[in-house]
Amino acid sequence: MKRLLYVVVAGILLLCFTPGIYAGALEDIEKKGEFIVGVRDGAIPFGFFDANNQHVGFSVDMAKELHKGLEAKLGKPIKLTLKTINPKTRIPLVANRTLNMVAGSSTHTIAREETVDFSITVFLTGTQLLAKKEKGFKSYKDMSGKRVGAAQGSTNEKAIRDLNTKGKIDPPAEIVVYQEHTQGMLALQKDIIDAYCTDGILLAGLKAKAPNPDEYELVGELITYDPYAYIVPEDDSNFRDFVNIELINIIKDGRYYKLYEKWFGPGGVVPYPMTQEAETLMKLQAWP
Amino acid sequence: MLSYNFNWSIIWTEPYGQWMLQGIWVTVRLGFICWFIALALGIIIGTFRVTPFRPLRIFGAVYTEVFRDIPLLVQLFFWYFAAPSILPKSIEMWLYRGLPDSEFWIVVVGLSIYTSSRIAEHIRAGMQSISQDQYYAALSTGFTHFQTYRFIIIPYAVRIVMPPLTAECLTVFKNTALAMTVGVLETTFMSQQIEAYTFQGIEATTAASLVYMGITLAVVFLMGLVEKRLAVPGLITRSGGR
């Protein structure tokens, strides 16, 4: 009996620590009949809950377009499941294959390439600061000795810490770390922090959704370069190719520009005209 | 099954090791401060609930029910985001800006009050298990109500409920993990930070788990020593001897 116990435990440990032979996301989706996509909650307008408590957003719509393409490719109906994630959990959940993809507002960085893979770029922005107009901040240098909020695990938190350690902000800013942008925005409203730091487009979204948007302004230049891409599992060429080709199709037949108009156009949630660079990037990314 | 590269050394390599140590120090400080404040408050509120004076009893009951029945995370958000708005603007700004480590002290308030409501219930249970004879004996030898509680009833009740109080002490240390949601840089936060920088989630979470286990086992050991030191021989016996 004891012998059997040892064998079973050894077997379980062996299973846990052998490198896995993973089939691939496309096979996984086909087998389960389910396409699991991680989407954001507080990232306006990429993924958020609207007034009717519906999960909506630019990336949510893109995920739905990808889902249509997936059904066409696999030739059978697939269920689309949207799971809410935050900046801290999105990469681990794709790395361990809980999610097939994350369609949110994730920056494509070299450091992250070690753990996960990314699709082609879908949006261009950079780290900026949001503060109340009355404070009169002009650039990130005004943050010395002030309290700046950021979301744990985001590129923006790292950017502000880097500015501190490299001495670009002297004396260093005090960084208060929250879990999601909604908490950071609440803290900014209540003057718990002097400025909130995240990607420029997300700040525009937070400002648009604030009770009095005119109180706030985006401060200063872009501190970092943040190209947004969708996160896909590491080492899965087939799935990444599918996502990229589908995104290129969406760009080529104009659906991308329609969705852009819907969310970032003059009548959209966050008016943000497409910059010349972004237009060029989208055109150049669309391989023949 | 798992395609994961283990790298246990990240727990102690710089700067991650330094982060963990800072986090552990914050957790230990937070736990200790909250525990002693909660113990003092809890004994007072628990006593309120069993006094013959109706206003004190009602106050005790309301306090206990309000802070026991709302989840701790909701209470922490209340104390951090909502409560300071009630104060005058200058005090509110001093609280958020002038006070160093304001997140830490706001969590001290929230966690102490929550734990004190639970300790109050334990103390009340302890007191109600003391027979009325003790109380009457004390009154008949000339003690006032206050003196009876201070010298006879409370010391007796605390010794009776030592085991549940030990459990509450452990709970306080475990609950300090929730402080990360309002920006306190304690152990859980630091382990998540290490995961965010290195993507080695299993090592980071294991480190945090071992830290908490270490702290709680130390607490159990210390409370055991306290219990032995405070025991009055023959005071708490099962009826029927032995």
Image (spheres, coloured by chain):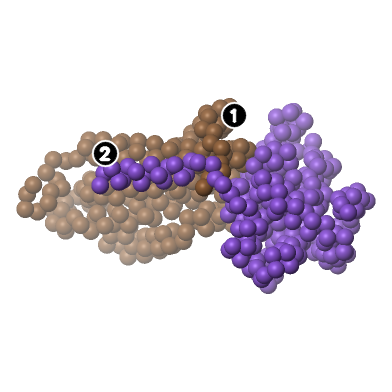
Compared across the picture, whether B73 is left or right of A186 comes to: left
Q: Looking at the colours in the rendered structure, which chain would you say is drawn in purple?
A: A
Type of amino acid under label 2: Gly
- Residue B15: image tag: 1
Real-space CA distance between mark 2 and mark 1, rounded to the nearest whole angstrom: 36 Å
Above or below for B32 versus B13? below
Amino acid residing under circle 1: Pro
Q: Secondary structure at mark 1?
A: loop
Query: Around disc 2, counting alpha carbons within 10 Å, would you say few (fewer than 14), some (14 to 19), or many (20 or more)?
Result: some
Callout 1: few (<14), some (14-19), or many (20+) C-alpha neighbours within 10 Å?
Answer: few
Q: Residue at x 44, y 59 (%)?
A: B67
Q: Which residue is mark 2?
A: B224
In which quadrant of the rendered view does residue A138 lie? top right
Q: Residue at x 56, y 47 (%)?
A: A21
Q: Which residue sits at x=16%, y=58%?
A: B132
From the rendered image, report the letter of the chain displayed in brown: B
Front label number (2 vs 1): 1
